[in-house]
Image (cartoon, rainbow, N blue to C red):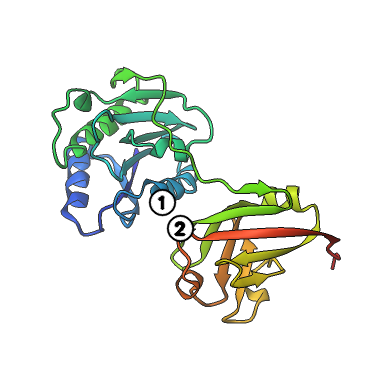
Amino acid sequence: MPIVTLTTDWIQDDYYTGAIKGKLISSFPGFNIIDITHNIPSFNIARAAFVLKNSYHHFPKGTIHIICVNAEPASGESLLAIEYDQHFFLGNDNGIFGLIFKEPPAAVVELPDYSKGKVQGFGSADPFAAAACHIAREGGLEGLGQEREGFAKSIPRRATIDQDVINGSVIYIDSYQNAITNITRELYERIGKGRQFEIALQSNHYKLHRINQTYSETSVGELLVLFNSLGLLEVAINKGNAAELLNLNNNSTIRIRFFDKILKKK
């Protein structure tokens, strides 16, 4: 049974959600439709990309991922079907694919409906449903549309290095109000080299000198940082809401300053 996932900036009970599911099932009754999320903030392709980048690979190979986030294209944009890592992605060429993929995709195809410029309003449901059916029946993108060399690429925010300082930023707030940053464990270890450090939040208003292994190492209600399952530095409060209480958002900065002294191993 072919799997289709939906990631949208609609709310769960919006009629758009029912409409696209109806089109999919009517065209291919065998589809198994999975909602990844319908709670992406309107037009926020960065948040949608983060969710998909860290979730798509948990689905079986051959899964079709429909992305309806800022899905109606502006002038010069097109709807694309892309094969990447043995998965298929359908979405608007608005820069989101460059935020999801680490490597060049196996194939990129422009869906024909948009090349004619005739689709209005919620028109992306039709070409997405048709493309998903084609992929399910044919097993790939061949014959679906015109092949493309590439796609629009937005540049993800990356942590920067200034001598002994890593300058990062919050890139995602999860459902527990934990603030996930773009500072990777690899970068921290490569620059830190086991040295003592100071982590500063909100223009040095909050400072920490320890990275937890687990949330419970810190008392309930206390601020902490740790590397999460994605290998990204995360700001949290044990049993609390860090982003809300510390007024953190996707523009908040986090800074790690290293000192010459080596940390003592416990």
Task: Report the side of 49 relative to 21 (left or right).
Answer: right
> Which residue shows up at 17% across the image and 47% down it?
19
Q: Quadrant of the N terminus?
A: top left
* Residue 81 visible, this angle: yes
Q: 21 or 102, which lies in front?
A: 102
Residue 42: x and y in percent read: 29, 53
Q: Amino acid at mark 2?
A: Asn
Q: Residue furthest bottom?
A: 220
Q: Quadrant of residue 207?
A: bottom right
Asked if 13 appears above or below 243 in the picture, the reply is above
Task: Report the side of 96 relative to 137 (left or right).
Answer: right
Helix, strand or loop at label 1? It is helix
Residue count near mark 1 (Cα–Cα under 10 Å), binned few <14, some 14–19, many ≥20? many
Q: Quadrant of residue 203?
A: bottom right
Residue 198: x and y in percent read: 71, 65
Q: Amino acid at mark 1?
A: Arg
Q: Which mark is residue 144?
A: none
Q: Quadrant of residue 26?
A: top left
* Residue on which the image places disc 2: 250
Asked if 257 appears above or below 87 in the picture, the reply is below
Q: Name which of mark 2 and mark 1 comes first in the sequence.
A: 1
* Residue on which the image places disc 1: 47
Report the mark closest to the observer, 2 or 1.
Answer: 2
Instruction: For the residues labelled 2 and 1, say whether their Cβ atoms are less than 8 Å apart.
Output: yes
Q: CA distance from mark 2 to mark 1?
A: 10 Å
